[in-house]
Image (tube, rainbow, N blue to C red):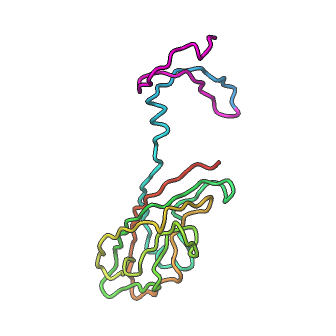
Amino acid sequence: MAIAQAYPLGTPKTNALLVGTSIPAANTNDKPITRNFSVGSILDLGNKSGIVTNTFTITAAQLETLGTTDVTLLALAGDTGRGEYLQLISASILPGGGALGSSYTWDAAGAFISWSDAAANNKITIPQNQLPIGSGLIGQPYTIAASDGGYRRGADLILGTATDPIIVGTPSGTLTINLTYRIFPQS
C-alpha cells in the first residue's frame, strides 16, 4: 500500500468516493467487506436529525382513568444509565367527542407529557381548558413547546394528570396528540 502523505490534497465533492469497511451484524459468520462510500452518503448519515412526529389517540376509557393510570406514549429502550435519550420538542393537542349534557372536569393543573408528573424539565403541560370537555363540542387545536431543550434518558414517556376527571353523563371524549420529539440511541 502506498504512503498516504504521498498523494496530493484534494477538495472533496459529494460524488467523491472513500474506501471503507462494511461491518456485518454481531454474532454472524459474515465477513467485513471493503467498499466505496460517497462523501455525500456520509454527509447524509451525519445530518439526519432524528426528529419524529407521531400521532397518539387517547380513548375515552384512557381519559377517564388518566389520574390513576398513566398512558405510555413511548417505551424507551434501556435505563437511566444506558438507555435511549429522548428530547421533547412540541405537541399539538386536539380534544374531541362527547354528548350534550355530559362533561369532564379536570384537575386545575391540567395534564402533562413527560416521564413523571414531578419532572421539572423537558416536559409539556397541557392546560385544563385544552383537555376534552366531553360536551359534544370539538375544541380548537392547541400547540405548545416543551418547557426546555433538555433530554431524558431511559424512562418511558407518559401522559398523565393528578386525578381522574369528574365525569357527568357519558362524555366519550378523545384526545389526539401530534407529538414531535427526537430520540438518540442507547449507548
Give how far across and how far down residue 121 sits, in percent. Answer: 54, 69
116 or 171: nearer the viewer: 116
Q: Is residue 10 magenta?
A: yes
Figure check: 186 above or below 39:
below
For the stretch drawn in magenta, the main secondary structure is loop
**Could you tell whether 94 is left or right of 106 in the image?**
left
Figure check: 14 above or below 89:
above
Q: Quadrant of residue 103?
A: bottom left
Give how far across and how far down residue 158 sits, in percent. Answer: 54, 67
The residue shown at (45%, 86%) is: 108
Q: Quadrant of residue 175?
A: bottom left
Give how far across and how far down residue 30 sits, in percent. Answer: 66, 25
The residue shown at (43%, 30%) is: 40
The residue shown at (54%, 14%) is: 7
Look at the image and give the residue range highlighted in magenta: 1-27
Figure check: 42 above or below 130:
above
Classify the position of the N terminus by image quarter. Answer: top right
Give how far across and how far down residue 90 sits, in percent. Answer: 42, 63
114 or 18: nearer the viewer: 18
Task: Report the number of discs.
Answer: 0
10 or 99: nearer the viewer: 10
